[in-house]
Image (tube, rainbow, N blue to C red):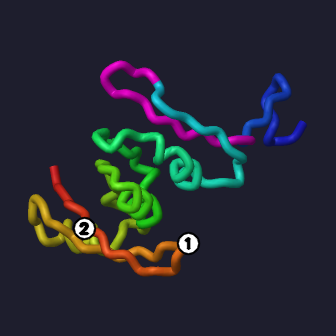
């Protein structure tokens, strides 16, 4: 038996990814998309972000962030809160600099390249240490 098989014949590796938006007050899904496992979660998020109401605030999971996601929210006029990693070898330089500054909050300008237009787009993030 392959090491990637479970006892009942189910594959242990994901064959698809699902990204869902859930109302934090009711626990009910408001949008969801399922895609091929070869895609990334942010590629799926990119497809459903237009379904979010402009007045809504997205709370992003720690693994679902980064310049690509921030740019999608910026281009869509949406707001988000992202609980970012602060330890390990993959922490963004601007976050490392913010942490060493010992400040409680800071507005950080970052630049991301829009893959469709090729333009560099500047955004502002508010970093908060709790």
Q: Which residues are magenta?
A: 15-28
Residue 16 in the magenta stretch? The answer is yes
Decide which of tag 2 and tag 1 comes sooner along the chain: 1
Front residue of this view, candidates 122 and 77 = 77
* Label ID, residue 47: none
Q: In this rendering, is residue 113 above or below 43?
A: below
Residue 27 in the magenta stretch? The answer is yes
Q: In this rendering, is residue 55 above or below 47?
A: above
Q: Residues within 10 Å of mark 2 (few under 14, many from 20)?
A: few
Q: Could you tell me residue 63's position as x and y percent?
A: 45, 51
Q: In this rendering, is residue 51 above or below 25?
A: below
Q: Could you tell me residue 124's position as x and y percent?
A: 25, 67
Q: Could you tell me residue 81's position as x and y percent?
A: 29, 48
Q: Residues within 10 Å of mark 1 (few under 14, many from 20)?
A: few
Q: Are marks 2 and 1 in contact (CB under 8 Å)?
A: no
Q: Secondary structure at mark 2?
A: strand
* Label ID, residue 116: 1
Residue at horizontal 56%, vertical 49%? Answer: 47
- For the image shown, how many numbered marks are present on the structure? 2
Q: Secondary structure at mark 1?
A: loop
Residue at horizontal 18%, vertical 71%? Answer: 100
103 sits to left or right of 17? left
Q: Nearer the viewer, mark 2 or mark 1?
A: 1
Residue at horizontal 81%, vertical 42%? Answer: 3
Residue under circle 2?
Answer: 124
Pick the quarter of the image with the N terminus: top right
Q: Could you tell me residue 59's position as x and y percent?
A: 34, 42
Instruction: Measure how far apart labels 2 and 1 are at the Cα level.
Output: 21 Å
90 sits to left or right of 9? left
Residue at horizontal 34%, vertical 55%? Answer: 77
């Amino acid at each position: 038996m392959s090491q990637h098989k479970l006892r009942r014949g189910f594959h242990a590796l994901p064959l698809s990814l699902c990204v869902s938006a859930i109302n934090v007050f009711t626990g009910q899904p408001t949008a969801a998309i399922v895609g091929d496992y070869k895609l990334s979660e942010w590629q799926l998020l990119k497809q459903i972000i237009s379904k979010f109401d402009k007045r809504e605030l997205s709370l992003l999971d720690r693994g679902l962030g980064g310049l690509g996601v921030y740019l999608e929210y910026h281009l869509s006029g949406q707001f988000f809160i992202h609980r970012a990693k602060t330890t390990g070898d993959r922490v963004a330089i601007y976050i490392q600099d913010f942490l060493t500054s010992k400040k409680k909050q800071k507005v950080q300008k970052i630049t991301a390249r829009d893959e469709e237009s090729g333009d560099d787009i500047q955004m502002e993030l508010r970093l908060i240490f709790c």
